[in-house]
Image (cartoon, helix red, strand yellow):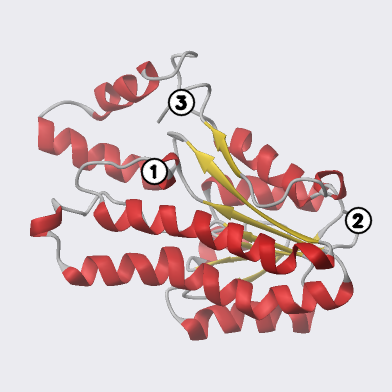
Amino acid sequence: MKDRVALVTGGGRGIGREVVRLLAAAGARVMAVSRSEAELASLEVDYVVADLGTAEGCALAVAQTQARLGPIDILVINHGIGSAHEKLVWEQDPAVWRETMAINLDAPFELARLTVGSMCERGFGRVVVTSSTAGEKAERSGSAYTASKHGVIGLARAVAQDAGPFGVTSNAVLPGWVRTEMAERSARAESARRGITCEQVWAERASIYPANRVLEPHEVAEVIAFLCSDAAGGVNGEAITVALGGVW
């Protein structure tokens, strides 16, 4: 992975931050992207502040990476919006649906569209998309999130078919519950709705896994980093669940 150029979205916190650290430690030249400069500035890598909910933001992230670091070899699409603010489908605000799709599905398409062709020309590339266990199952009051996370698995598999003949792999990683800021927001929303504490919510989430705990961000990041490596050349078009043996 030494001197490979990696673009990591959602790189300022949680899983993305751990991916940035792992790839940089392996010798990659990493560009981290998010909307929060304060979080990005604390990383010891190049970064760009961009709103990936727009095509312009995606183009900016790619252009800045190419201009400052060179052609992109590794694309980790890890940013996203959660479901804490969603409602039952018949109560769902269409604006929530559109925002979720723009961030969770349109942006991965734009980023892939802008980078994968160049990877194919050079004969090497790695694309890894962070989906969710909600990418294969459904949650209540989460129609937009669930649909978008199903969608990015399909996108990753489609890219695998298009780019596989040229030495480029594309895979999705499906984490279970990880104690990140996004998941904390959903825990707070659930605790308010049910009249229980956030810690009770997290205890319930932990109880669904054989290990009786939730994931740490670095555990998901390790799988992503492997899929970015030369050693993962035989893994393509897969949806890999990282959920401690649980089903959700």
Q: What residue does disc 3 label?
A: 214
Residue 107's x, y, as percent? 49, 72
Q: Amino acid at mark 2?
A: Lys
> Relative to 109, is 143 on the left or the right?
left
What crowding class fits label 2: few (fewer than 14 Cα within 10 Å), some (14-19), or many (20 or more)?
few
Total numbered circles: 3
Can residue 56 be seen?
Answer: yes
Q: Is residue 106 above or below residue 8?
A: below
Alpha carbon separation for disc pair 1 and 2 = 34 Å
State which quarter of the image contains the C terminus: top left
Q: Is residue 236 above or below residue 178?
A: below
Q: Is residue 248 above or below residue 14?
A: above
Residue 103's x, y, as percent? 41, 68
Residue 2 or residue 116, whichever sits in front:
116
Q: Secondary structure at mark 3?
A: loop
Residue 189's x, y, as percent? 20, 42
> Relative to 199, is 61 on the left or the right?
right
Residue 210's x, y, as percent? 47, 13
Q: Secondary structure at mark 1?
A: helix
Question: Residue 2 — which label?
Answer: 2
> In front: mark 1 or mark 2?
1
Q: Amino acid at mark 1?
A: Ala
Question: Residue 149 — which label?
Answer: none
Q: What residue does disc 1 label?
A: 134
Q: Amino acid at mark 3?
A: Val
Q: Secondary structure at mark 2?
A: loop
